[in-house]
Image: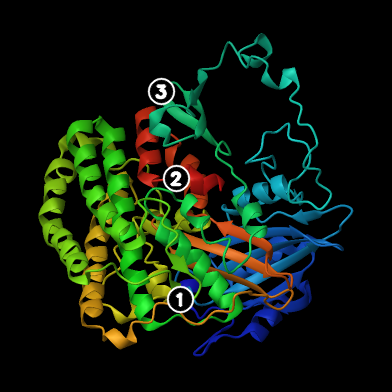
Amino acid sequence: MSLQERQPVGVTEDGLDYDALADLLGDRVIGREHHLNAEGFVVRPTDVEETLELLRDEAGFDHLSCLTAQEYEDRYESIYHLTKYDDRTQELSVVVPADPEDPVSESAAGVYETANWHEREAYDLVGVDYDDHPDLRRILLPETWQGHPLANDYHQDRPQLVPFQEHKNPLEDDHHDAESDTMFLNIGPHHPATHGVLHLKTTLDGEQVADVDPDIGYLHRCEEQMAQQGTYRHQIMPYPDRWDYASAGLLNEWAYARVAEDLNDIEVPEYAQVIRTMGAELCRIAAHMLAVGTFALDIYGDFTAIFMYAMRDREKVQNILEDLTGQRMMFNYFRLGGVVWDLPEPREEFFEQTRDFLDDLPETLEEYHDLITNNEIFQKRVIDTGVLDPEDAKSYGCTGPVARASGIDYDLRRDDPYGYYDELDWDVITENGGDNYSRFLVRMQEVEQSARIIEQCVDLLEDWPEDERTIQSNVPRTLKPEPDTETYRAVEGAKGELGIYVRSDGTDKPGRFKIRSPCFSNLSALESMSEGEYVPDLVATLGSLDVILGEVDR
């Protein structure tokens, strides 16, 4: 009997029975912690793989959403944040302490594919060594980097020297096999189809892709470290706009707002929740417009029509967002407890501008379908290429349109409700093809659903009594959560699950601030999606993932 045919261990009508899960794990559990979002089970560094296998196979925890690593005075620690694609509200943390002198922990990459990249990042930045990891090397910093930036003994002013031999010619005789048909091909980081600064180390067997190794980190800007130097109340909120900087700023801001409000027990007025929901969906439309336009440009180079049409309609959304927030890109509009100010005056003009955009959108989308969806060249390039089956998508931790295009019905707006989403009428879009075409179709249909949400928000805001328009709750000027309070919260970003883990240290600044980027996990699946295909298919698959390197690298 499969897990789908029987009740997972620890599931009751009221939610999770953590005692039953502890019984399942037996003496592997050596301690328990309480985090605001979920219970945490402490296990030995040598029991990681067995623990996670049991939780996945017997208890149904098929989604490793995030891995957080950090160093304390007496130990290193890895936290595996687990949840379920079928029920996002069921969460569990697996906490793995490691020796401070020799921080070695068993790898989880044999259980969840997404642990591969997450553990590489933890090794790179914190210094935890994951035993039996299939490819434990740096991921954001160069291989020649000295030290681990988030370790307590890291010397920031230490000179970084790159030995000449690190850049020897890879085509020298000792690197060349005369009998091999394989060829090494660099794609990016300067090629426009790599969407910023992504380097794909590609191995070809004849004309087919035998292996592709995404080389990231060119846009790493220490966003987590900067957030750890800022105060909860005032100094962190401007940073999220810079993660997914392609019009998705309010979605990013909401990720931070949600985790900080949870950590500090802050309520948000209903009126402000409606404004947040409307603004977030405007950002989603703008981000999807950019994704559609650049994807068509990647596929068959249609710059003058499709790309410019998409930019034209994205500009309409940008104009609305500029009126709302005062900025075109780096909005900095959300505040803990609400938003920074009310809708622009005169309100009637703002509502009219928004409704005009929504009224024109159905005809606009129909035009896109004529130009793109029904285009034979486009169809031949994207149908049955870049296929990602549901089980692989789950193992790699894929979320957002990438997961929903593989038939995974997972959307945090519905599955872990926040804002005003659970009060509105809208649908989660899924497709079953799992290919590049399906990912495009999901984004097109999600624009329609976002428009439905925005229209309902506008209706509510128009009729909201003037004396009840509270945009912010009363938040203390200085926020100091209790020491060692921990939580992980996420929102449905334009690309998928955008989550943040925060641990407080009793001060007005986070002790640890970890960003879970949806693009990071989605991009890690590129190798699985591209093996055996041709270079043009690889380019199409990369475009269908809609990655933003500012969010991948952080």
- Amino acid type at circle 3 is Glu
Spatial CA span between label 1 and label 2:
39 Å
- Amino acid type at circle 2 is Ile
SS assignment at label 2: loop
Q: Of callouts 1 and 2, which one flags the residue occurring earlier in the amino acid sequence?
A: 1
Instruction: Using the rendered view, name the quadrant where residue 56 is placed.
Output: bottom right
Q: Is residue 428 left or right of residue 268?
A: left
Check if mark 3's residue and mark 1's residue have beta carbons within 8 Å. no
Where residue 217 appears, x then y in whole percent?
58, 39
Q: Of callouts 3 and 1, which one flags the residue occurring earlier in the amino acid sequence?
A: 1
Q: Count residues near mark 3 (Cα–Cα under 10 Å), then give few for <14, some for 14-19, many for 20+.
A: some
The furthest residue to the right = 101
Residue assigned mark 1: 5
Residue assigned mark 3: 207
- Amino acid type at circle 1 is Glu
Tell me, what colour scheme is on the image? rainbow
Q: Count residues near mark 1 (Cα–Cα under 10 Å), then give few for <14, some for 14-19, many for 20+.
A: few
Where residue 247 appears, x then y in whole percent?
36, 51
Residue lying at 17% horizontally and 36% vertically, measured from the top left: 305
Give 82 or 298, whichever is nearer the viewer: 298
Q: Is residue 175 visible?
A: yes
Q: Is residue 317 left or right of residue 139?
A: left
Residue assigned mark 2: 548
In this rendering, the label closer to the viewer, 1 or 2 = 2
SS assignment at label 1: helix
Give 241 or 178, whichever is nearer the viewer: 241
Residue lying at 38% horizontally and 33% vertically, measured from the top left: 539
Give 436 or 457, whichever is nearer the viewer: 457
